[in-house]
Every structure is written in C-alpha cells, then in structure tokens.
Image (spheres, rainbow, N blue to C red):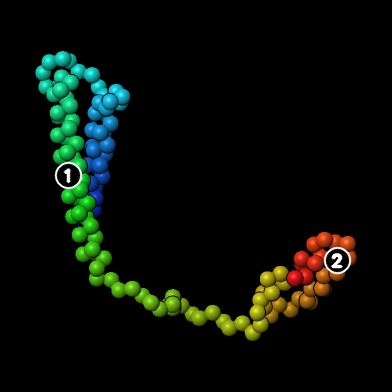
C-alpha cells in the first residue's frame, strides 16, 4: 500500500512538471515561452530541443506510471468480494401497524385525524385537475 501511495505522489509531481514544461514551450502564437540569448544551450533552438525532449520524457514517465498504478490498484482491490446482502448489522426496525400519514405525523399517533378539505367552488378552474 505504501508503494501505491509513493507512486501516486510521484505521478502527481510528474504531471505538474509536464504541465509546466508544456506551458513554457513557445507555440505558434507565442504562448508563455521565455526568451533567451541567441547563443548557447538556451538559445531559441537549444531551448526548443530541450523542452521537446523533456516533454517526451515526462509524458512517457506519466504513461508508464499510470499503467503501473492501474496494475497495483487491481492487486490491492482484487481480493474483496461484493456484499450482496441488505443487512446493515443492527437491530431491525419495529414493524409499523399502519402506513404513515405524510401530513399527519407518524403512524400510531394518538392525535385526532385531520378534517377533510372543503370542496372547491364550481368556478375554480383547478378544482377539476385536483380531483383527477
């Protein structure tokens, strides 16, 4: 389990580095690319080659880590069985004698039953829809 956590942290670091390297690269529109001196390793061509190689290496490491973590996750969770019972391990609830009234409270309440609603006037347009 500790190997799985370690590789997860390494993959997060690789992903962050990959995002950073991709954002630094100069795109056709300029992007977030940084300028450099015209000579040496950090010239435009040298930086582009370095960033391209870094992107390829980090992307390869990310894919390999993803495959390894998927294989480890199968091994970690492969031994479990699915519980198909509905029992939650506790006392069973008491059996109700009458269905609960959603407006009048819980079943078996000693309060007096609610009075029936008064009929709607004949000119009420919603009266017919409520009775259906």
Give the CA distance from mark 1 to mark 2.
Answer: 74 Å
For disc 2, the marked residue is 120
- Between residue 74 and residue 128, name the one nearer to us: 128
Residue 76, quarter of the rendered image: bottom left
Residue at 16% x, 35% y: name it. 54
> Quadrant of the image for the N terminus?
bottom left
What crowding class fits label 1: few (fewer than 14 Cα within 10 Å), some (14-19), or many (20 or more)? few
Along the horizontal axis of the image, is 44 left or right of 129?
left
Q: Secondary structure at mark 2?
A: loop
Q: Can you tell which mark lies on residue 80? A: none
Please, is residue 97 above or below residue 67 in the view? below
- The residue beneath circle 1 is 60
Of label 1 and label 2, which has the lower sequence position?
1
Q: Is residue 55 left or right of residue 117?
A: left
Residue name at image x 14 percent, y 28 percent: 49
Q: Quadrant of residue 51?
A: top left
Q: Is 126 on the left-hand or right-hand side of 66?
A: right
x and y, in percent, of residue 20 in the image: 26, 33
Question: In this figure, what is the number of numbered marks?
Answer: 2
């Amino acid at each position: 389990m500790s190997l799985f956590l370690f590789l997860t942290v390494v993959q997060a670091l690789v992903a962050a580095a990959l995002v950073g390297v991709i954002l630094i690269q100069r795109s056709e529109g300029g992007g977030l690319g940084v300028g450099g001196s015209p000579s040496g390793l950090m010239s435009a061509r040298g930086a582009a080659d370095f960033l391209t190689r870094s992107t390829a290496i980090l992307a390869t490491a990310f894919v390999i880590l993803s495959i390894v973590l998927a294989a480890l996750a199968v091994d970690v969770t492969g031994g479990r069985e699915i519980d198909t019972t509905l029992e939650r391990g506790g006392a069973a609830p008491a059996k109700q004698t009458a269905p609960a009234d959603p407006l009048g409270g819980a079943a078996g309440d000693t309060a007096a039953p609610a009075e029936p609603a008064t009929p709607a006037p004949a000119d009420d347009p919603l009266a017919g829809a409520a009775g259906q």
